[in-house]
Image (cartoon, rainbow, N blue to C red):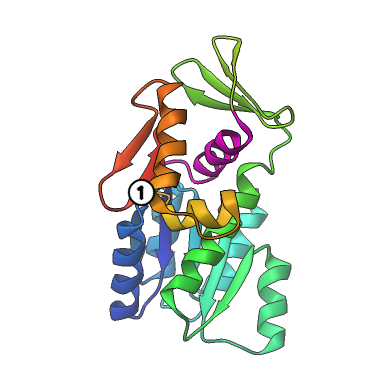
Amino acid sequence: MRILILEDEYALRISIEEFLEDLGFEVKGFERGDDFLDELYNQSYDIILLDVKVPGINGFELLKELRSAGNQIPAIFVTSMTHVDDLAKGFELGCCDYIKKPFDLKELEVRLRNVLRRECFASKQDIVELGRGYRYDVAKMQLLCDGKEIALTKQEKKILELLIKNRGSVVSLEHFCEEVWGEYVDSANVRVHINKLRKKLDKELIQNVHGLGYKLVT
């Protein structure tokens, strides 16, 4: 999962980049709006984080240009502009969320994952291609390999869906507890369920990232 950041405060930008990289995301940041826009037109990203008051093209103008050009990449404003009119303008321009500075990095993670979760299954397509012959039917909650269904338990389906929603990034054991079980579960128990799922799949599809969690590699 690739994230592009527009933030002109150097220390904050580096803190966000390092935090997100530790979570398993691929991250790149810029301080100027025009440099950010050039990068976005030249490379593919899954979501953007935008400050508003930056050199060059400001965050509001930048998102307006993207939406006018038909680019619907998910966007989150991260800004010190806290007036309700600014918040309203951000959503009118097409942002998915609006985080007010100062903020805790954990809040950023929660909001980021929430946006990515919504966007992952927002498509009208019911089939998510996972590669290696695997496909996931969202509507029927079925995992298929070369057209044949792989039997999964209810918990295994939830685990797989969480990994799909966070494709390319690491999902921590705590996140599995929150999303799959809705409460604290012993980490050894979580690992048991994940390993049972892994045994039903290509061994390279779900990777164990030592000390951090698991990620789906597609």
Which residue is found at the position 48% from the left and 75% from the top? 51
Residue 125 is drawn in which quadrant?
A: top right
Circle 1 crowding by C-alpha within 10 Å: few under 14, some 14–19, many from 20: some
Residue 194: in sight, yes or no?
yes
In magenta, the rendered stretch is 153-169
Residue identifier under label 1: 213
The secondary structure that dominates the magenta segment is helix
Is 78 within the magenta?
Answer: no
Q: Nearer the viewer, residue 62 or 140?
A: 140
Image x and y of residue 42, in percent: 40, 45
Residue 60 is drawn in which quadrant?
A: bottom right
Is 167 within the magenta?
Answer: yes
Q: Nearer the viewer, residue 61 or 84?
A: 84
In the displayed structure, 203 sits above or below 23; it is: above
Q: Nearer the viewer, residue 133 or 8?
A: 133
Q: Residue furthest left?
A: 210
Residue 100 is drawn in which quadrant?
A: bottom right
